[in-house]
Amino acid sequence: REEEVSEEQNVKVAKAELIQSRRLLQMHELRATISGKVKEVLKNPGEAVKEQELLVRLQNVEALRVEGFVDLQEARKLRKGMPVIVEPVQPEAPVELLRGHIQDVNAVAVTPGKEPWIISGGEDRCARVWGRKPLSTLDARLVWKELWTLRHPASVRAVACTGVAAKKSLAATGTADGVVRLWDLKDLEKKPRELTKQHNGTINALAFSADGELCVSAGDDKSFCIWNTGSGELVERVPDAHRGAVTSVQFTADGKLLTAGRDNTLIVWNLEKNGKVKSRATEFDRRSGHVDQLGVSVDGKFVLFDQGRQLQVLSIEAGKIEGVLRNTASSNFTTAAWFSPDGQAIVTIGAADNRLQLWRNPLNARDRQTRGRAAELRQYVWPDSPTTCAAFAPEAPFLVTATRDRQVLIWALPSAEEIVERPANAELIHIDDFLEANARQIRIVAEIRRKTESLKPGGTATLVIYPK
């Protein structure tokens, strides 16, 4: 009997211990507010856990959440329930890599057409012409190949091609010795026409007028020259057009010329029909960035104007800021910024890690709340070397860039549907109420209320919140 009583007591003790163990386990049980598939376990049983520390990652594409960080000063303005605009950003690698240059590549340009040529110029004193050709006589797949090597006596610093509306098919190259060369793209075996004795120093920028009848060159000597492409004659030379090197020249659709220089000014010039300078129309000063080449919209109404981490879309006629691109990275915009041929997007150089950024044109935003503010669409990633130049294909869906490590890169562009897509809507559901030691940012979480096709689980996005 004593043995039976002892056994009953042991059973009672064991049951009590089991109940207590279950209670302890339930106290440390993970309970997610959404159901889903476990993608990653960040903490194992027995490991110490801090307050608000992530333990497990779940995936449920029907209940997407976005996590982000805001500066402590800005976080004080936020409240749960605030609406959030979610702008997906997709990192992408180049789709093609063209190798041939043996030194830095300084300039690129793309000819019109569905099967265009790419022209790149570099420190190796060559302009290289690239096109798509069959892989072999037995394989009809088209691949990019170097078609021509145009040799120069000095480094090639600038390249330009005639556009879609031009009757001529020309390319221009500018070199470090101050010479401009015009090449007939229909007969590259023919010697180029040399435009000489006007620039003293490096040619930094070249551009053709829409009809291809005029070519403008600009250089370190603070001047720009306008040339007749048919005769090769100098139409106009403007010495001391800027107080520093001239780095950007662009013709507009309505017959104006825009120049930008290292004196931090942007100047609009009125031209006669024959290309002679009629008057100096407008000067925009107080540029504070490092963007040497500033793009002009296809309709000639807007120009990009650099202000450090901001790039403004400026109305040429009114002199008014109509839109802004804000770099969320810590670095400034640099080197170049261009409108796409259809005016829907803008490419910029200067993001962290040598990334290029592709933005929606802020003037085309469909949402009234976001009009005037550009949304980032792509981050084109080439971490090995800084980007030196960029050019859109006028009639093909790609972008070309080049780098200091001798590469010419081709990037795919997003579809027209994605570019005009409305951003996703979300609601702010969580704001951390504590701050890690030495931290200057607070974690926030937003839950998606209206998804978009471009918003993918595991992707990255920019969160936009307008505090009331």
Image (cartoon, helix red, strand yellow):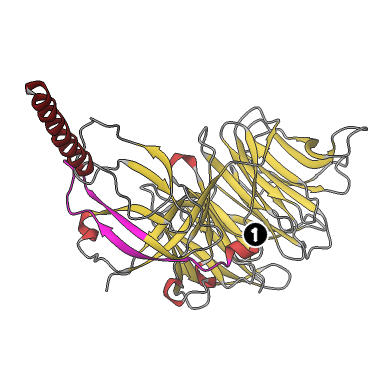
Q: What kind of residue is marked 1?
A: Ser
Q: Quadrant of the C terminus?
A: bottom left
The image position of residue 387, as x and y in percent, is: 54, 41
Outermost residue toward the right in this view: 137
Is-magenta flag for residue 460?
A: no
Residue 268 is at least partly visible in this image? yes
Outermost residue toward the front in this view: 1
The image position of residue 282, as x and y in percent, is: 50, 72
Outermost residue toward the top in this view: 3
User: Residue at point 49% right, 53% down?
Assistant: 89
Vertical arrangement, residue 122 with respect to residue 1, above or below: below
Vertical arrangement, residue 102 with respect to residue 364, above or below: above
Is-magenta flag for residue 431?
A: yes
The image position of residue 272, as x and y in percent, is: 68, 73
Image position of 59 (left or right of 438): right
Residue 385 or 23: which is nearer the viewer? 23
Residue 156 is at least partly visible in this image? no
Magenta residues, start to end: 420-446
What residue would you read off at disc 1? 415
Image position of 383 (left or right of 462): right
Secondary structure category for the residue under label 1: loop
User: Residue at point 32% right, 69% down?
Assistant: 466
The image position of residue 249, as x and y in percent, is: 60, 58
Residue 354 or 381: which is nearer the viewer? 381
The tally of labels here is 1
